[in-house]
Structure formats: C-alpha cells, structure tokens
Amino acid sequence: MIKSHQLLSLKYPSLLVAFTGSRISGQSPDLQAGEAVGLDNALPDDTLPTINIVTISHKITRQLFGEGETGMEQGMETGTKPIYTWDARPSRRNLTAADIRACKGVRKLTQTTANTIEEAAAAADSGIDMLICNAANVDLVRRGAPHHFLTAAMPIPDYQTDEDILRGALTALKQGADSVMTARRLEVVEMLAKEDIPVMGHLGLVPRKSTWRGGLRAVGRTADEALALMQDFRDLENAGAFSVEAEVIPADVLAAISPRTGLITMSLGSGPGGDVMYLFQNDICGENPLPRHSRAFGNLAALADQMAAERRAALSAFREASLDGSFPGPAENAKIPATELDAFLAALEKKS
C-alpha cells in the first residue's frame, strides 16, 4: 500500500511518483531519473532514489488534488489548469485571475451566484465561467464546483472591523475561494490587495448604501454623476482592486468606462459593455419576482408552486386515508403466519 509520505508531486501536478529503490521501474533502462519525472534540475543518481511511476487510484488522487468529488482527472478533461490554493493545496481551476485579466476586451465571460452544492454544480455543468457566493458558503460551493473560479462576498454587517475583514477573507481563501468581494472603503480594498488577494469592489447601485442615492435607482444618469462614477472606478483600481461589480449603471456609461479601466467589470444590470455578464442565479432560474434589470430564463417558481400544492395534497390524502381506515392496507402491513398468531393469542389469553 502506498503511503502519503511516499508520494511526490513534481513539476507537473498530474504526475505522481513513489520512491521504490535503486532503479526506475516501468521506464526505459536508459532513461535517467530526472528525465523520467520531468525535473528541470535532476539530482545526481547517487542522491536521488530512482522511482517507479505508479497508477494512483481515483480515491487517493481526489484526496491529494481534488476539492470535491470530481477530482483531478475530471478537471483535466474539462480544460482546467493546475494551481495551488491559498491553503497551499494542489488543485485545478477553469480560470485564474491572470486568465480573467487576459480576457478583458477579448472574450466575454459569465458569472452567477451559487450558495448550495446543487446551485454550484448546476452552474458548472451549464458552462458558467465564474461563481460568487456568500463567504459563509465557500465550502458548500467548492463541493459542487471544485474547479471554478470563485469569489467570496463578504457582507458588511458580518465583518465589522478591518481585522474581521482580513480574517474573514483569509478564511474564505483557505476554504477554496479565489477572490473576495467587499463594498467597504478604499482603505479596506488596499489592505486586502497588499496581501495579493484578488479583490472585487462594488460600484454603481450598492443596495446596502442606497439611502445615499435616494433609494434604489440607476447610478450615472447625468453627465456629472457619470464622471464621478468614472473617478470611483479609477480610485478603486488605484487601491489595488482586481474587479468590480458594476450594478445598475446605464449601459452606455459602463460601455464607455470599462475600456478605460484595468478593472474587470462585472455587469449586473449595466448593459453588455462589461467584461463579465452577471446575474443572480435565482433570477436566471425564475425563482422570485425580478428586478427590472434582470431576466428569467427558467420558471422554477412555477415548479415550486406545483411542489407546494402537491405536498399539501399528499399530506391531506394521508390524513384522510388514516382516518377512514384505508391506510395502512394489506400491502403496507407486516404479516405473521396464522399458526404463530394463534399461538400468540392463546398465550395472551392464558396470561390474562
């Protein structure tokens, strides 16, 4: 049995080897140890035990490389690339922060929310590029989508002090997030960015701060307001942010701002000019009344209503059948042989 301390991930995370002794087993006798494992700087033969390339079971591979049940091999099949997580664990991602930056102005990406295993798996299976979740749900989302680029949103009331924010960000990253999202002041963004954390800011309509805007409304509908918004983008970028949720900004305004900033712009109700098209999953799937800027591409609300009605009908039918004696019936009842029943009843009569 191969023990974990005998395993070694070398230059390529997909290549696992086990030290076995004096020769390279399963390889050409003329192949040197360094060549066998693809090392850039092979150690001398007298200092490096020769190795045996082994087939590792899916279970062991998942334990070493996977963050969920999908595992490394499936990740390779779906076009992911090797990374190390913030917890220093080998894993794979469909996109990295560098990839996303390289897509700006070249390739449109998509993002949606996920806060459960099923939501994460559904988004991944549907080809959505990026996910965002509440920081409290990172572990669940990673189980549903082990290899997707994931941003952990940190709600303002849940992380009250700068220390809370930094601790919460590092915790989310340790659990598998790739980026964190905050709507806090620029100094907070700068604090996180100085730790090399990819930070998503929030500009335009920030619902929690909507009282300063006079309520829920589009932001940037006048030339002065649009210019002030452009400065907000510059300030956020200068603070070190990686991306920004651009919420309910007039489409023409974001289309003008996005190419003038290095930030990855996540357009939520701000038109097609952003780098990433973003909608909440419950809006996409039609689970609740929609805000004006959103669109339902499904109708889960109707299915939920149907399920609710079916649940009540079933419970009512159970009660009625229980009271009229039709449940349980012969098919649901356990049986005792007639001779055993007679003996049992006779014994009861004697004892009584």
Image (cartoon, rainbow, N blue to C red):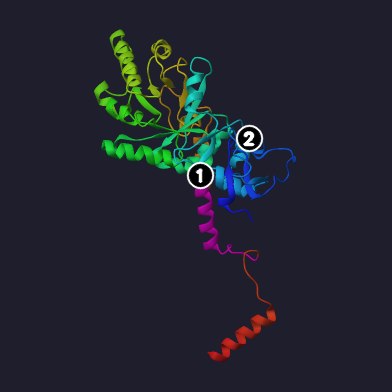
Q: Amino acid at mark 1?
A: Ala
Above/below status of 273 relative to 147: above
In percent of width and height, residue 163 lies at 28, 38
Image side of residue 204 versus residue 176, left or right: left
Image side of residue 255 versus residue 327, left or right: left
Residue annotated with mark 2: 38
In percent of width and height, residue 79 lies at 61, 30
- In which quadrant of the rendered view does residue 72 lie? top right
Q: Is residue 306 visible?
A: no
Q: Amino acid at mark 2?
A: Gly
Magenta span has 316? yes
SS for callout 2: loop
Which of the two discs, 1 and 2, labels the residue nearer the N terminus? 2
> Principal SS element in the magenta part?
helix
Q: Residue at x 66, y 40 (%)?
A: 33
Residue reaching furthest to the bottom: 350
Residue annotated with mark 1: 309
Above/below status of 260 relative to 24: above
In percent of width and height, residue 78 lies at 62, 32
> Looking at the image, how many numbered discs can be counted on the residues?
2
Above/below status of 176 relative to 269: below
Foreground disc of the pair 1, 2: 2
Viewer-proximal residue among 218 and 108: 108
Whether pointer 1 and pointer 2 mark residues with C-beta atoms closer than 8 Å, the reply is: no
- In which quadrant of the rendered view does residue 185 lie? top left
* The N terminus: image quadrant: bottom right
Q: Is residue 203 visible?
A: yes
The local crowd at label 2, few if under 14, some if 14 to 19, many if 20 or more residues have their Cα within 10 Å, is few
Magenta residues span 311-330
